[in-house]
Amino acid sequence: MLHLFGCWLLRPSLVSQKASHSSVSYPSELSCYIPPLLQRPVHKESLPGADGCVSWDVHHCHLLGSSMLSDHMENIYGYLMKYTNLVTGWQYRFFVLNNDAGLLEYFVNEQSRHLKPRGTLQLAGAVISPSDEDSHTFTVNAASGEQYKLRATDAKERQHWVSRLQICTQHHTEAIGKNNPPLKSRSFSLASQGSANSPGVQRRPSQNAVSFFNVGHHRLPTGKRVPIMQPDHLVDVREEPEEINPDEELEDICDNKEDDLGAVEEQRSVILHLLSQLKLGMDLTRVVLPTFILEKRSLLEMYADFMSHPDLFIAITNGTTPEERMIRFVEYYLTSFHEGRKGAIAKKPYNPIIGETFHCSWRMPKSDVAAEAGSNFSAHSPSEQVTLSKDMEGQTELDYYTVKFVAEQVSHHPPVSGFYAECAERKMCVNAHVWTKSKFLGMSIGVTMIGEGLLSLLEHGEEYTFSLPCAYARSILTVPWVELGGKVNINCAKTGYSASINFHTKPFYGGKLHRVTGEVKQNMTNTVVCRVQGEWNSVLEFTYSSGETKYVDLTKLSVTRKRVRPLEKQGPFESRKLWQHVTESLRDGDIDKATEHKRALEERQRNEERLRAETETPWCTKYFLKEGDGWVYHKPLWKTVSAAQTQQTDIN
């Protein structure tokens, strides 16, 4: 049955040009909240009476009917609240959805509708996102980067605006696809990993444009094929773990900064198509994203880049007290994230292939590792990083510490990576496993880092557990950038010290980017011994219980280049060797060729997964073993040191 929408709203909202003149009744106690321009009594006798209601005239009130597409493709208009700025805040504005032109326009009020609109948004490629803040607010994010933050009276009104805006957006976005036939030469898949009934296969039934997605198996583009090098059979990865000799590794000269927006700008229409296929909150684990948004390194190598300050890592165990060691760990932890990003442009690392590994090491002059409290931040500038390395030439092994790192992709579904780093001389190591879970959030992508890390300081018999923050790729249609968010905890059960760190996402209005706050405390006494605030990619301020304050400019911290084996000495499943041809093609700007090489790797992985399922053969990892819900390195330092100590005791 048809019913009037808005009968108990504070103001009329959705208006259809198809509906007839009608009226709406409001309780009299709410009339003071209705803007004067909306208060238009129909008849004097309809003023407050026995029923306690006031009847207000609502021209062209929208009648809800069938949910078919044809019933919703109509021009609607009405009042919404729009957030303007910090000074004026929320203001009532009269909005018009023009389906034919694909525009959302707004005016100061209904009387000024015949004038030029105050603002206009193109809806092709836009993302309509209901807000998590409340049940009334939603945003319209245009492909140009412009955004309207709007507020309806209640959840029902918001849903009607959102649904009609989404239908209009989809219609005009698909129209772009019809007018851009070159896109057909590229193949992307929403379900390239997993079965046809996986979450990624969902398609909107109303889609009628030529999609640039091939759902299910990849279909190669027609025409001349790009020659590719096929990777070796992925099942061959199951072999005895190779122990990498750090002496075979050379200082890394690769510098894959991701500051080029060219490919993203050129492929804007492809991104629009991608967004039209995704649903808000959709799990992106099984979604293969376009090749041009990839950065030129594997996710496993990105984890290694978090260790780019090995001097701060080694200095943790130099702390003379449990309190000092916890504070040093927090200082190191907060300085590790900025170097993990390669450039200001947010791009996505390669999804590691199951069985893929990455090895590297760092050499750190012992003279550069702080021994005293408060001195573990060097003052070298980034430009000195090569000089620092050259200064080590000719030094013996006794003059420097070595930190070794290994990472392995231990699971495909879910995608889990394990990584391990150790400094054997200082008897310290860190072991972690991370499951990256991605979701589509409208104009951004959220990545939850599920898992846990464990830092072991064997000299002190201490273990520190820690988690990782969530990451967000924002403004994915314009200039994408990375933001961290969420609360992480660091705990040492033996000493009773803990740390709580909050990575703050920027609010819609006001506030700073990349803000982080935290505190270190002694749990037994609940005493805060250190507070930290600042930006995780800029300047951090540490305030200690002694009253001392220290500022750390992360942009001026020295970065120690990692050491890796030359490509010709790497195994076929080491990250750089495995992704070599994809990386070279991206560096040359040949997106089609990079896509072909990437597809070959992924297709082999799917074939191997299918073969293992048919033969009921479990996957065997190389360097990490499953223990409970986590993954542990097969030869962690705490085992080898314990074994050595036992052997020494037997000798004595």
Image (cartoon, rainbow, N blue to C red):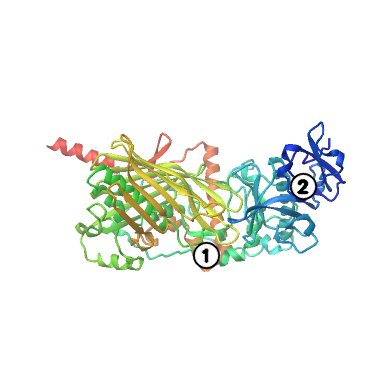
Residue at (13, 37) in percent of width and height: 651
Residue 196 drawn at (x, y percent): 64, 43
Of residue 215 and residue 82, the one placed in the foreground of this image is 82
Of residue 247 and residue 60, the one placed in the foreground of this image is 60
- The disc placed on residue 14 is 2
Q: Is residue 144 left or right of residue 542?
A: right
Furthest residue in direction left, as rendered: 652
Q: Is residue 214 left or right of residue 301?
A: right
Residue 68, placed above or below residue 585: above
Residue at (68, 64) in percent of width and height: 182
What amino acid is found at the position of numbered circle 1 in the picture? Ser
Of residue 377 and residue 298, the one placed in the foreground of this image is 377
Counting residues from the start of the chain, the first of labels 2 and 1 encountered is 2
Label 1 sits on a secondary structure element that is helix
How much space separates mark 2 and mark 1, taking CA atoms?
A: 51 Å
- Residue 397 lies in quadrant: bottom left
